[in-house]
Image (cartoon, rainbow, N blue to C red):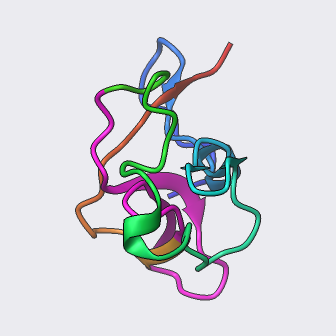
Amino acid sequence: MSETTELGDDGWRLPTIEELRTLVYCSNTGQYGISQNFIMCGDVDSYQQPTVNIQAFPETPPMYFLSSSPHAQFSHDIWYASFLSGHVNHGHENGGYHVRLVRTD
């Protein structure tokens, strides 16, 4: 999968991991975005789930969301953002992730 995977003629595509990262919101710290990989928002009971702004994205499930960014070292891994715990990680590209599409202008 290439980093700029297009999903049709109308401009919708999978976001990069950097774009998905900006949607993570840790309610216990008030921090938007997450700069490090593998770091959760905190102890499980200390933040809201899903770890996004629920006023902006009210129906977002607390699940893993696929990016278009492949892992540099593991050829079958892809980066994802967890809106369950607020972390960024990688896993197998066929891992059964949710998608949140973005539109290219």
- Who is closer to the viewer here, 19 or 13? 19
Give the residue displayed 42% in from the left and 22% down from the top: 8
Give the residue displayed 51% in from the left and 53% down from the top: 67
Q: Quadrant of residue 69?
A: bottom right
Give the residue displayed 40% in from the left and 53% down from the top: 65
Residue 93 to residue 62: above or below:
below
Q: Is residue 102 magenta?
A: no
- Who is closer to the viewer here, 21 or 102? 21
Residue 84 to residue 77: above or below:
above
User: Measured from the top left, where is residue 32 in percent x and y?
Assistant: 69, 46
Decide if residue 36 is on the left or right side of residue 57: right
User: Measured from the top left, where is residue 25 in percent x and y?
Assistant: 58, 47
The magenta region covers 59-88
Name the residue at the right extreme: 35
- Who is closer to the viewer here, 13 or 27? 27
User: Measured from the top left, where is residue 83 in percent x and y?
Assistant: 42, 54
Q: How many marks?
A: 0
User: Measured from the top left, where is residue 49 in percent x and y?
Assistant: 36, 51
Q: Is residue 63 magenta?
A: yes
Give the residue displayed 63% in from the left and 48% down from the top: 16
Residue 22 to residue 53: above or below:
below
Q: Quadrant of residue 11?
A: top right
Looking at the figure, which quarter contains the C terminus? Answer: top right
Name the residue at the left extreme: 96
